[in-house]
Amino acid sequence: CDVSFTDDAFWKVFEFSFLKGKPYLKEEFESGIKKAVITESMARLLYGNIEVIGKPIRLSYADYTICGVVKDVSTLAEYAYAQAWVP
């Protein structure tokens, strides 16, 4: 899984189509809460559907809670592409 480490401002700079949930907020980022936004295809691969808000995921040896699902991002979008985004 391609993981991108971002801050809360990332979600304001890049436009993503959220299918479920929402991105992590500034307060959550600053507090170190382990939330993750994943792509639709990653959600389907892991759980068989996109009803994954609140479910666990392990990325880079750390446990996170899924807070959002976005439409898949093209690999041509160099600065925005990933399959999962975490604080």
Image (spheres, rainbow, N blue to C red):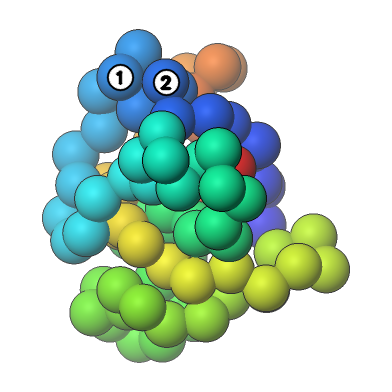
Q: Is residue 50 above or below residue 78?
A: below
Which residue occupies 42% across, 20% down? 9
Residue ranking furthest to the right: 61
Q: Which residue is mark 2?
A: 9
Amino acid type assigned to the residue bearing label 1 in the image: Lys
Which residue occupies 39% across, 46% down? 24
| Location of residue 23 by image quarter | top left
Question: Left or right: where does residue 19 sit relative to residue 3?
Answer: left
Question: Left or right: where does residue 59 sit relative to residue 9?
Answer: right
For mark 1, give the secondary structure. Answer: helix
Residue 72 % position (x, y): 35, 45
Tell me, yes or no, whether the two marked residues, 2 and 1, touch with CB atoms within 8 Å: yes
Which residue occupies 35% across, 13% down? 13
Residue 27 % position (x, y): 42, 40
Q: Which residue is mark 1?
A: 12
Crowd rating for badge 2 (residues with CA inside 10 Å; few <14, some 14–19, many 20+): few
Could you tell me how far apart the alpha carbons at marks 2 and 1 are, in whole angstroms? 5 Å
